[in-house]
Every structure is written in structure tokens, then in C-alpha cells.
Amino acid sequence: MADLAAHSAHPPGFAHQFEEMDQQRAAGNLGMWVFLVTEIMFFGGLFAAYTIYRSLHPQAFEIGSHLLEVQFGATNTAVLICSSLTMALAIHSAQTGKSKSTIIGYLIATMILGAAFIGIKLYFEWYHDYVEHLVPGINFVIRPEWGHSGSQVPMFFCFYFFMTGLHALHMVIGIAILTVLTIMTARGRFSSEYYAPLEISGLYWHFVDIVWIFLFPLLYLIGGRYGSGVH
Amino acid sequence: MSGQEPHGHVVPVGTYLGIFLALIAMTGITTGVAYIDLGPANTVVALAIAVVKMLLVVLFFMHVKYSPGLTRLVIVAGFFWLAIMVAMTLSDELTRHWTPESGPWSMLLPFLTKFF
Amino acid sequence: MSTLVAPVNEPPSPSSRVHYLNASYGIRSWLFTTDHKRIALLYLGSITFMFLVGGIAATLMRLHLIEPQGALFEPGTFNKLFTIHGIVMVFFFLVPSIPATLGNFLVPMMIGARDLAFPKLNLLSWYIYIVGALFTLYAIIAGGVDTGWTFYTPYSSSYAHSQVIAVALGVFITGFSSILTGLNFVVTIHKMRAPGLTWFRLPLFIWAMYATSIIFILGTPVIAITLFLLALERLLHIGIFDPAIGGDPLLFQHLFWFYSHPAVYIMILPGMGVISELITCFSRKRIFGYSFVAFSSMAIAVISFLVWGHHMFVTGQSIYAGLIFSVLSFLVAIPSAIKVFNWTATLYKGSISYQAPMLYALGFIGLFTMGGLTGLFLASLATDVHLNGTYFIVAHFHYIMVGGAVMAYLGGIHFWWPKITGRLYSDGWARFAALVIFVGFNLTFFPQFMLGYLGMPRRYAVYPAEFQVLNVMSSAGASILGIGYLIPLIYLLWSMRYGPPAGPNPWRAKGLEWETPSPPPTENFEEIPVVTEDAYNYAHSGGETRG
């Protein structure tokens, strides 16, 4: 039968429900993009709530934002941009038939950068905020110098922790996915004809980078950093 | 099958490096601009730079520049729906304390008195 | 006496041939399957169980409401009953019902594919559903939830002493099941249609599933994050809905209803798709206005996201926003009305037969129209002020959800049962059950329109004595309705063992799924079909060409 002959000629990684490899590739890409749209709406709920409360409580948000340290946010932004580059280069290496170790090198670099991001966040930022009594629900202390909008500053920190926390969770999942990809690469599963899992995981990783690209100005740069800041 | 052109558009490494440098530069700019007093424009500039960075990542790192139109439609739909959620929720949150004023236009549509 | 067309030759018994049901045996072959047809049956069993759970809650409520002072329960317990009834019926029955059972089974078959685009994700979606359901069942056993299925803050976030977190997590988890199903359908419909099957040759059931999937994808993540935030606020005793730190309880409602309004269209759109299939087959006629029906599905999916504020007219929303939402809510009725007109026009001069699926379809058209029209009273701000929070709302949505969606679901199950199982059921018993359901349904819910109009509030465990007659009528209807639902369970299960073989196409229907044996083989088609004709290419056109 025509179908059986076609099946045996298909490259490795081909799934039986499809008729052609191109169809499978297109479906995989579309599937990941549809998933990323669900992620836009998932994070979007938080961004929407943030927009509303920032409009309603601008001073409290500015006070909270100035309590974050810009250098860590900016460094982490740069770290993630580097990791997007290494991820793109990992896929490029697979596309152009480079050796397994090249691909693995880029994947591990991406993972290290991702881990660095989380390390900076956990230690220099979150732990520091914990020491400074800025964690709502755990040990938050309202400071008198915040004035009459002080009671709403915990709201900013709720958003800070929820949004960066959700983002960090996605990073951890991304690192786990990259680990799996590294093992798959080491086992020779990919070639210049079949690298779809790398490609669609790359889409996920870049998406997580984009979320941070927006989180950085929205959380760290509210109201500018000129002058004393506190109104 | 081997030896054939790989499926999917191959973006040159040079392009990737260029985009990378642009992204780093814009991160520096957005951080630096925050230390300059532009009033409300600070937020606008910061968000505009973020949007440009996002577009670079989407078009080049995520290959959307070389992807079929359906992909673009899907992405636009996602952002459009997010915009619906934000805009229509704001339409309540920001107008909740508007008090209806009386005037000739208020008989037609209450909110018009805000503008006339 | 069955009025199905007798096959010319006695079709082979389903046990004499290899097909998806007997291709492999054992529980592992079911729990680790990636065959969309088996996964559909896994879902069918699960949602039927959850329907019974939600149905028991409803039965207990209606028994309690026989007496004005409440016959059976404390008010706190009554609160838990209506909450559980709502949560289970909405999230664990109606939302997955047609998409996860009939959709999973039929989408690949109707488009000439061997399976969905991502069969393993399909299986994962079922497991996710089960985990979510287990969280909810745990919550019920561990004391229940009393916030209403709408979980409004600050009661749910700060004051309720019930299993809010467990249920919120359960619904959160199950939401991902919907997302994966919707994702699978969208990619499958875009990328896996058979050669010649252009968009405008697709069965309208596929258009309906596609529109539903758009809502799954864009709406479900929002309720996921919202319930997650609610659970966090309960856990941490502080959160973004907390007025003490500047939070707005109404924001919860905005985020909740941003999904939950489109969710009601998730619940009805697939049913509308089923009705298009049933009406055409049982009038032996092409659908009137194919593109209008197709586009109206898409219009419903889009506009459904613009109207959520109509649930918040009386909870403190700005009146200006209320005006916008009211106008848009009127607008969303239009595509639904277009469908009703098109189905009616399809019936006109059709060659109509009244087997059980058609009875369900005709019942749907009438009851959905009533439910939909009563929605317009609620879209209007002035009347909503009086009707909100009363039994009018309860009747309105039950007419659509039960009189509409559940009838369509049952009609679809009865229509495709021969394809799914390879067996015929007794059409006599099926028609009897359909009539019992129709009578029971109307007796249950029409009095509730009157109760609401007269002012009886919803979610109350006690009521003024003058409302007792109508309440007793409603409870009597509910018992009839319950019996009506049990009857199909019996004869359908019986038919799986003892029903006569169905043959490939007992209804002589058009559609690729009917061109396979019943039950179908695991790969659906020996050769992928090539499509050369429009959908519903019934010989009898009644003078109408594809519109």
C-alpha cells in the first residue's frame, strides 16, 4: 500500500498520524505557538491586574519599585538575553549539521545562564527582600517613611513576588526541558533533518525571556530613578 | 534525505549576534534613561523599548520573520485578547467614581458629559 | 420498533473484525492508549461519573426545597450543595462534555485524519482532568465548599471555612486539560485535513469545535491564574484582592468572568455543532446558509469575550462600563439567532424523520431559543437590576445548559453511538427517554422563571411560603428529569452487549466518519480519503444550493 511505502521512507522522529514530515514540523510549530498564546493570557492576567492597581495606586507602586535594586534586574535582563542567543545558536548548530558536542555546548551554556538568573534572583534579591521585611504574608513591615500610601506598598510586593515567582517557575521548567534535550542530543536523536524538539523548546525559552523583558521596566523602573524618588 | 537543504529557514550567525548586541544596548539605554527625569514619558519610553526588544526576539530568535502568516495571526490574536481584557477591565476600574453630571448631552448618553 | 434503515446484507458482528475496541486488551492498553477514540471513551466514563455527582447534589437541593423552611439541610450545608453542583456540572461535566467525548472521537474522523495532531498530549489531557477531579472529590469528602461556583472574594479569600483551596486547585488543574484539548483541535483542523477538504467543505461540527477551541485557548488560562491567585491569598492571608492593601474584590470578578462568560459558549457551541449534523441528516437536506452558520460560530467565539461585565451589573461595577457590556451582550445574541433561523430553514421542506437524535435536536431548538431570549432580559440593565440574583437567572442558564447543551450532547451520543460501539440501541426506548427528559426538564425549570420574576432569590435555603407550589412543581420535575437521564444509561449499556450490529452508516448520513466500518479500525481509514463534494450533500435540496 502506498502509505506503508511512504512510512518506511520517513526520517526518524516521524509520527504516524501525519502524512509528511513537513506537515509534522508545521503542526509542532503551530502547537507551540498556540501554547505560547495560552501563556500570554496566563501571565496576562497578572499583567492586567498590575496595570489596574498601578493606575489606582501610583505612589505605592513607585515606592515599592524604588526598593528593588536596578543593577540586579538589569544584569538578569542581560543574562537572559545571552541565554536566548545561546539557545538560538544551539538550534542553528543542529540546523547546519554541527557536531553533537557543539549543540550540547550551547544547550548547557543556556542552562548555566538560566541557573545564574535564578541564583541572582534567589540570593541577591529575594533573600535580601526577606531580610528587609518586604515579603507580604511572611514578614512584611510597613515603614513610616512611606507615608499615607504605605499600606498599599505590600500590593506592589505581592505583584513583584507573584510575577517574578511565576516567571522563575517557568525558567526552572525550561531548564528541565533543556536537560532532556541535552540527553536526547547526546543520544544522537537530532540531525539537520530532524531537530523539531529543539526548535519548539527554543520558542518556549525565548518566550520566557520576553516575559522578563517586560517585567524589568514594569517592576524596576517605575517613576524613574532620578532624584530621591519617594514622594 | 541527507544532503538536502535543512528544513526551515537558517538565520546566519551574524544576524543573531547583531540582534543580541542590539538587545544588550537597548537594555543599557532603558536602564540609563530611567535616571533621567522625563516625567510620565519615562514609562512610555521604557515600554516602547521593551516592545522593540520583544519584536527583535520574536522576529529573529523565534523565526517569525520567516514563518507562515498563520503564526503571525496566532500571535496577534494573543496580544489582542490581552488588550481586550486590560481595556475593558480598566473601563470599569477607572470610571467607577465618575459621577453623572447633568447637561444637555447627559440625556443622550451619560458619559458624554465628561467630554462636552 | 426501530425505524432505522435495515442494511441490505446483515453487517458483520463487531466481534468478528479487528477495530479500535478489540485491537488490544487489558487495562494497560486503555490507560496508556494514544488512540483518540479510546481516549474519548475514557472521558465519556469520567464525565458521566461527574454528571452523577453533580446530579446527586441537584437532587438533594430540590428535595430540600420542597419545604419553605427547608426540608433536609442546614443553610450552611445547602450552600455547599449548590456550590458543588455548580462546580462539578460546569467544570467537570459541561465544559469537557462534547469536546472531550464526541470531539475527540469525531474530529480526526470527520477531517479524514488518522488521529489528532498530538495523541500523547490528548492522553495527558485526560490524566490532568482526572487529577483535577480527584482534588474536587477530595474537597467534597473533606467538608465541601460553600462559596458558590463563582468563588467571589472576599468571602472565598478571607472568610470561608471550607475547602476552597482544594477545589480552586482542582479547577485550576482541570483547566489545563481543556487547554490541551483546544490546542490539539486547532492544530489538527489547520494542518491535518484530508486532500480536497477545504475550510468551506468542513462539517459544521468541525467549525463549532474550532470556535470552541479558540475559547479554550484564550479564556482558560485567565481563570487558571485567577484561581491560583485566590488560593495564594487564602494561604498567605494577603493578596491582590485584599482591600486592606488597596485590592479590589471586583477585580476577582472581572478576571473570573473574563473566562467564565466565554465558558458558557464553550458549553453551547459544540452542542450547536451537533445540532447542525442532526438537523441535516434527519431532514435529508443541506444546511441552509452554510457560511452563515460557520461564521456565526466564529462570531460567537469572538464576541463572547466582550460581554463578561453583564454578570457584574449589580455588584458595584461602573455604570459606564455596564452600558458598554449591555450593548455588546445584545450583540452576542445575534449569531445565535442566525443559527436558529438557519436550522429552521433547513427543516422547511425537508424529509423529516423523528428518531431519538432528531427529537433531541428539535427539543434543543425550542429550549435554547427560550433560554437565549430570556438572556436578553438580563442583558438589559434596567430589568437585570430586578432579575439578578433570582431564580430567573437560574432558569435562564438551565434552559440553555440543560435544555440546550445536555440535550445536544444526548442527541449526539445517540446519533454517533452506532459508530462508536458498532451496535444499535432500541429507538423506541430512546424516544421515550427523550420525551421523559423533555417533560421533566420543562416541569423543573419553567416554574423557576416564574419564581424569579416573583422575586425568589437564588442560593437561598429557605423561601417565603407563597412560593411553595412552584418549588414543589420544580422538584417534581427534577425527579422526572433524573429518571429520564437514567433510562439511556440502561439501554445504551445494554446495547453494547446485546444490540444488533450497526453497519457503517445506519442513518445513511453524509460525512467521512460514516464511510468507515462501525466500530472504526484504530487508524480510522485504510487510505486517506480525497474529498470532492460539499458537506451535507444530501440528494434532497429543497431548492437550496450552498449558501
Image (tube, rainbow, N blue to C red):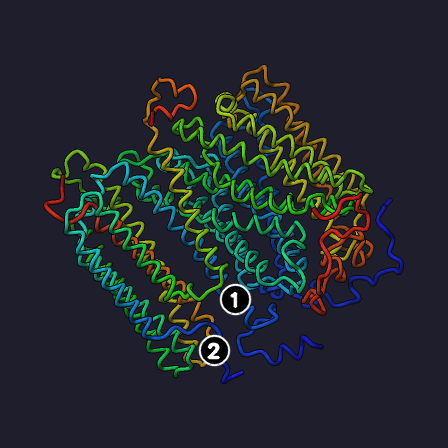
Which of these two is toward me, C158 or C532? C532
Q: At x 76% / y 62%, what residue is drawn? A: C517
- Tell me the chain of label 1: A
Q: Residue furthest left?
A: A228
- Tell me the chain of label 2: B
User: For the residue labelled by badge 2, is the local secondary structure a helix, a strand or a loop?
Assistant: loop
Dot 2 crowding, Cα within 10 Å, few <14, some 14–19, many 20+ = some
Dot 1 crowding, Cα within 10 Å, few <14, some 14–19, many 20+ = some
Please state the horizontal and vertical placement of residue A103, each as a whole percent of the image: 37, 78
Which of these two is toward me, C251 or C136? C251
Q: At x 84% / y 61%, what residue is drawn? A: C11
Residue where numbered disc 1 is placed: A26
Left or right, C492 with respect to C81, comes to: right
Q: Quadrant of residue C374?
A: top right
Please state the horizontal and vertical placement of residue C356, each as a whole percent of the image: 77, 42
The answer, for residue C461, to whether it is visible in the render is: no
Point out the image quarter for the N terminus of chain C: top right
User: For the residue labelled by badge 1, is the local secondary structure a helix, a strand or a loop?
Assistant: helix
Amino acid type indicated by mark 1:
Ala
Which of these two is toward me, B14 or C464? B14
The answer, for residue C518, to whether it is visible in the render is: yes
Q: CA distance from mark 2 to mark 1?
A: 14 Å
Marks 2 and 1 share the same chain:
no
Left or right, B80 with respect to A6, comes to: left
Left or right, C436 with respect to A153, comes to: right
Please state the horizontal and vertical placement of residue C69, each as a whole percent of the image: 54, 20
Q: Quadrant of residue A112?
A: bottom left
Residue where numbered disc 2 is placed: B6
Which of these two is toward me, C430 or C493? C430
Q: Is residue C254 above or below residue B69?
A: above
